[in-house]
Image (tube, rainbow, N blue to C red):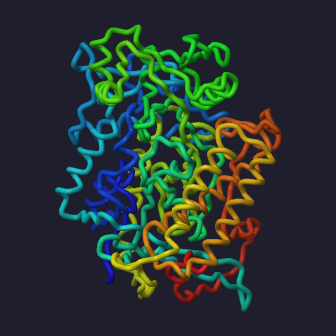
Amino acid sequence: MKNQFDYLVIGSGIAGLTFALKAARSGSVAIVTKKDRLETNTNYAQGGIASVFGPDDSFDLHLQDTFNAGDGLCHPEVVDIVVKTGPDRIKDLLELGVAFNRGADPNLFDLGREGGHSRNRILHAQDMTGKAVEKVLMAAAESDPNIVIFENHLVLDLVIQHQSMKTGSVDLYQRDTCRGAYVLDITGEQIHTFVANAVLLCAGGAGKVYLYTSNPDVATGDGLAIAYRAGAKLANLEFVQFHPTCLYHPAAKNFLISEAVRGEGGRLIDRRGRAFMEKYHPLKDLAFRDIVARAIDTEMKTTGDDCVFLDISHLDGQFLKERFPNIHQRCLSLGIDIVKDPIPVVPAAHYMCGGIVTNPSGHTTIRNLYALGECACTGLHGANRLASNSLLEAMVFAHVAAAECSEQIQSWRSRILPDVPDCSAKIANQNSSNNEMVMIAHNWDVIRRLMWNYVGIVRTDNRLVLALTHVLQIKMELKEHMPKIPLNSDLVELQGLALVAELIIRCAIQRKESRGLHFNVDHPQKDDSKWLKDTVVRKNPVEEFLSSVRFTTDEHVSEQGQPLAFLHR
């Protein structure tokens, strides 16, 4: 079954919804999301959105804080775009009806502060900012007649049209164009072909590649795996941000204790009640996330304790209940009263600072393919993301990409889209039994434990090599046994998870230094002479020197790429 739209948006978080609402003014939009439409990383974001609104703040200060966090790898032109256009994107949300908290003066926002910020600039809706934003954006999308939302639809692979550039009879290189995607309807057990003039990867992060994460179950790195298989460039995947403070409790799954708690005066203490962050950084509890996460990791390994504690009980109890209602209620349900009890916390995988390489318009290295949000590597975050810059980045680049696409849509429509072949892969039936499903569950667990233990907050050359060996072995097992397993969503996610794990490890092995979120005890110092650059990976790299060669070309379009290519690797 074929579905044709002007724009195909993969993902229903803040990046995908923002783009869809703006692009719908110029064409038809399909949003595909692999679970419930509200099950996104955005919906779980607690802290807020960083932007310059305070009377004592300035663009220059926000720029400098972002550069300081990024540890030398931020792209200046990108940081400039995001910071300076950020207030306009906040105004977009206000016009849609997002209710950010106001201060004593109702004309001013109640601005919070988080780690690495030199001023209070975090706009928030209590401690459930992401949910407030997601709800408003989704309501607007649902009421837009040009937007169709497909829930429980898992993207398998992109439809790539290969175009060879020739001079005489010699192929010089290939230019690829994205024409759509093959999508598995999980509930209907069918594979649909979506054809579009532009495809937007807004598939979120990859936190589930680690055993402990703040991310929901949907964050399996789908966008990264899809883009890599299609031949797009990815970069900086070694820079996985571990949030310092996830709730440590056997009954708590993936529950984040917002950085805003430390921003309001929370202190990290050990089991004996001693504060320890002053040993690690002058900013103490408000240091950058990479520093705080490593400090907690060091304290736990030194003392042998299972966790540290975040204490905010010295503040007014009523203020805490009003400022952090969600955190207060969740902790209280587990027997922890933040008004009087310190909160047990541990670091957990939180945010992928690298991703699919894009230009300042969100365009990837494949024509008509864009990447927005956490799955993209725009150059904003560098080696470490400044807290609450992520939702801002998603909105800014969704706006820019929508503007570019809207300008080109008439030109795209004038071209005849190719006849995309349907997919004939065998799909698992709900009533069928499969004895090989145990392999999926086993390898899923092995990968996540391996990544946590060997490719976590602190790394070594030896552990990275061992991790790569193990992941490649798992991929070999999957390749050998895949023909025995009918296609199902668990298998697709496992294959993507294994690929993303491999790419993270390969990037980490390449970078022979310690910078930002990547800390290797065998290379403890930064090396600007060699590593003041992005770490780039690509499946089929084009010879860079060809881009500077002038020649007369003869273009022709080859046959379509193989559907569901990942099933045959």
Name the spot of residue 232 as percent of width and height, x first: 59, 65
Q: Quadrant of the C terminus?
A: bottom right
Judging depth in this view, the residue of 24 and 501 nearest the camera is: 501
In the rendered image, is residue 95 in sight?
Answer: yes
In this rendered view, identify the residue nearer to me: 207 or 297: 297
- Residue at screen point 59% across, 16% down: 283
Q: Picture coordinates of residue 41 (x, y %)?
A: 40, 46
Number of numbered discs overlaid on the protein picture: 0
Q: Residue at x 42, y 24 (%)?
A: 260
Name the residue nearer the viewer: 325 or 364: 325
Does residue 448 appear to the left or right of 171 in the view shown?
Answer: left
The residue at the point 52 percent across, 85 percent down is 560
Q: Residue at x 20, y 57 (%)?
A: 142
Q: In the shown orientation, is residue 96 left or right of residue 80?
A: left
Quadrant occupied by the N terminus? bottom left
- Front in this rendered view, residue 407 or 340: 340
How far across and how far down the image is residue 520, in percent? 75, 39
Relative to 72, 465 lies left or right: right
Image vertical order of residue 136 relative to residue 286, above or below = below
Against 440, residue 350 (above or below) is above
**Which of the 4 image quarters holds residue 417?**
bottom left
Residue 444 percent location from the top left of the image:
55, 59
